[in-house]
Amino acid sequence: MTESKEEKFYDKKISRRQMLKYTGAGAAGIAIGASGLGGILNVFGMTAPDDDESAVNKVNFYGAHQSGIANEVPTHVYFASLNVTVKSLKELQNLFKAWTPLTVRLMNGEPIGEASSNGFVPAKDTGESKGLDASNLTITFGVGPSLFEKPELGLAHKRPSELKQLPHFPKDQLETAYSDGDICIQACADDPQVAFHAVRNLIRAASGKVTMKWSQAGFNSYPMKKNKKQTPRNLFAFKDGTVNINTKSKTDMNETVWVQPGESASWMTGGSYLVTRRIQMHLETWDRTALGEQEATFGRHRDSGAPLGLHHEMDDLGLDRKESSGEMTIPADSHGRLARESGERILRRSFSYSSGVIDSTGTFDAGLLFISFQKHPKQFIKIQNSFGRVDKLNEYITHRGSALFACFPGVQKGSYIGEALFKSL
């Protein structure tokens, strides 16, 4: 379909004759009634389906904020960073319009298109999630600084001043292969194949409009106690996310995560900034380190998650506590103390990853896909600067990838992903 025809189609300016031509229905002599037109639009993924409240393990798509931020963190993520190849703002807008109904269907646990008995064309949906439920799938879209630098899109004047590459931090050894991107798609689900299927089909539907820059799958495991999820552990075996903010608290979310009116570009109101860091964890070095040294690195006991010298995970760190020798109980270079001393808060949604072996060293290519949401990137930057060269954890990790994305506010019924940005032009 040419660009001009595509624009008419997305803008619903398509005529009955054009519809017959595009679909071939005219040649087949099929009379198109109201329901028939809906079916054809369905074939193209152009109708706006509703959230299916009857779907099993379903998270709603429509709402004030995008899914995948305040929702409970599931066990799997597939994160993709894309570059766009569209040549006009209209094409970019049409891309997000086309992704909207497809995303609703995926989050309903449905295929992105109707099944076909025509064996001479590829199936609309790739099919690997058939038989699986929605698996609490959430899909989050964001745009990176580089999208606003493309002169053919004319978006430069709409870039929020804070949407720029993160500064270089001590011990960064960033690789282009795991950094930046024009658009990100974060798909989280309780089934790894459901998460992958979602990203795969969204990219497939955008063939010729985007290319993949980098991607990373990740996982979490949750111990259960009295039917309640406990804090997951990272690959160093320490609990990860103990002091996370309460996503059910409107006050916490508004103060920390959701951009409020006047705090950023107007189109970001209700949105959030996503930071991701691909952090290699040097497991072989860690595994040779004494348990006491490991616990001093985090400032917490490994098994209980309690601050050093205490017994319960949720006990306050107590930064003023000292040993009989006069030394601070929570070491000055511990990860936990430095994070607390930054005075900033963020919403962490991190996942472990394991991606085989690093050929040059023969060691695990494994670590943490760190993801955080905050209303301003400076929150993350201040925490990372607090770690600086002092953080004892630096001996055991290396930051290999880094990216910042602006995540749109939520989508209302009848609207589409990113509409706030395009309406602001």
Image: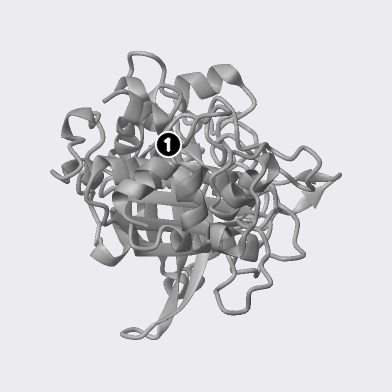
User: Circle 1 sits on which residue?
Assistant: 13
Q: Residue 200 appears at what percent x and percent y?
A: 51, 64
Q: Does any portion of residue 236 appear in the rendered image?
A: no
Residue furthest to the left in view is 151
Q: In the shown orientation, is residue 297 left or right of residue 175?
A: right
Query: Which is nearer the eye, 376 or 135?
Result: 135
Q: Quadrant of the C terminus?
A: top left
Q: Amino acid at mark 1?
A: Lys
- Mark 1 lies on a secondary structure that is loop
Residue 162 sits above or below residue 149 on the image: above
The residue at the point 53 percent across, 61 percent down is 24
Query: Which is nearer the eye, 178 or 288?
Result: 178
Q: Residue 109 appears at what percent x and percent y?
A: 70, 53
Q: Residue 335 appears at what percent x and percent y?
A: 42, 46
The residue at the point 53 percent across, 35 percent down is 66
Q: In the shown orientation, is residue 390 left or right of residue 73?
A: left
Query: Which is nearer the eye, 109 or 296?
Result: 109
Q: Quadrant of the N terminus?
A: bottom left
Residue furthest to the right in view is 226
Query: Which is nearer the eye, 311 or 21?
Result: 21
The residue at the point 56 percent across, 42 percent down is 68
Residue 166: name its quadrant.
top left
Residue 185 sits above or below residue 120 on the image: above
Around disc 1, counting alpha carbons within 10 Å, would you say few (fewer than 14), some (14 to 19), or many (20 or more)?
A: few
Q: Does any portion of residue 194 appear in the rendered image?
A: yes
Which color scheme did the rendering employ for the protein?
one colour
The residue at the point 69 percent across, 72 percent down is 117
Residue 118 sits above or below residue 293 on the image: below
Residue 213 sits above or below residue 267 on the image: below
Q: Residue 207 appears at what percent x and percent y?
A: 39, 63
